Image (cartoon, helix red, strand yellow):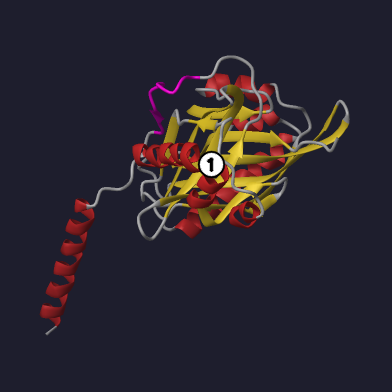
Amino acid sequence: MRSTTILGGVIAVLLATTASAKTPAATADDVAAAERAFAALAQEVGVVDSFRANAAPEGIVFTPDPTNAQADLAKQKSEKGPPFLKWWPIWAGVAASGDLGFTTGPATYDDKSIGYYFTVWAKQPDGTWKWLLDHGSGPTTGDLPGVDTPLARLAPTSARSPSAKRAFAGVQAAEARLNAGLAADPAGAFAAVLVDDTRVMGLGTQLTAGREAAVAALARRPSGMTATPLSGAASKAGDFAYTYGDVRWTGKNGPRRGHYVRIWQKRAGGWRLIFDEVVMVRQPG
């Protein structure tokens, strides 16, 4: 009886393994395709209706603080262009488990540059992708990469955490160390978690590519910044996570604040910062 039970268990595992092998995990191209479809729908039905159709039930926007996207969109009037808001992905990544991903790229309004967008995506139970967080860098200088720019993809990693819960706990610890070092030694704090393919944007900086460009961009940020985490999530594979939080500093005209959004990836040496963006909250008036 016991041998039959064991044999049945082995067969079940083999069948599950075979089934998973026949269903490949999502790729960065799948997430980019969801972003392109999102942008294309905006040209057809208008930005508000496209955002409603593509936002996850728990998706958030910053208005200026984190707000449920669907609740915020319900207050907005549907409108169609022109002028049109347009955007397209030039960099994307996805968790090994295919449940979380991101894209970023240029955005224009009435064909004039308005900077870069950043979107965190989650795969839904029905297999579709919906966005969890939508953010934008604000105005930047210089030319934007065109719509025909080849898509750059975040390389996958073999490092894993035992569960999403354990993964996010690790990310929170890494982020706590980073945030603690920002005010005293921002260069040193970031240096501990940056990698060759880290990208940074926001506060007037275009999307960078590479550690050297990221270091230069971070050096241009205001000194004395303090960051407080708010929320985020990790992938089921325990290799990928996003976080967001509050940022404060003192500028030329007094106290300022904004929000950061980050992407973390687990690598052989621990959790590494793949993306960091800070968007300033507009002051009244």
Q: Residues within 10 Å of mark 1 (few under 14, many from 20)?
A: some
Left or right placement of residue 130 versus residue 112 in this view: left
The residue indicated by pointer 1 is 46
Disc 1 residue type (three-letter): Gly
Query: Please, is residue 211 above or below residue 75 in the view?
Result: above
Tell which of 236 and 74 is nearer to you: 74
Residue drawn at point x = 48 percent, y = 49 percent: 54
Query: Please, is residue 91 above or below residue 240 in the view?
Result: above
Instruction: Count the marks.
Output: 1
Left or right placement of residue 191 versus residue 272 in this view: right
**Magenta segment, which residues?**
145-154
Left or right placement of residue 148 versus residue 133 in this view: left
Q: Quadrant of the C terminus?
A: top right
Q: Position of residue 128 (x, y in %)?
A: 38, 52
Query: Please, is residue 16 above or below residue 106 in the view?
Result: below
146 in magenta: yes
Q: Position of residue 132 (x, y in %)?
A: 53, 50
Residue drawn at point x = 66 percent, y = 54 percent: 75
Q: Quadrant of the N terminus?
A: bottom left
Tell which of 31 and 216 is nearer to you: 31
By secondary structure, the bulk of the magenta-drawn segment is best described as loop
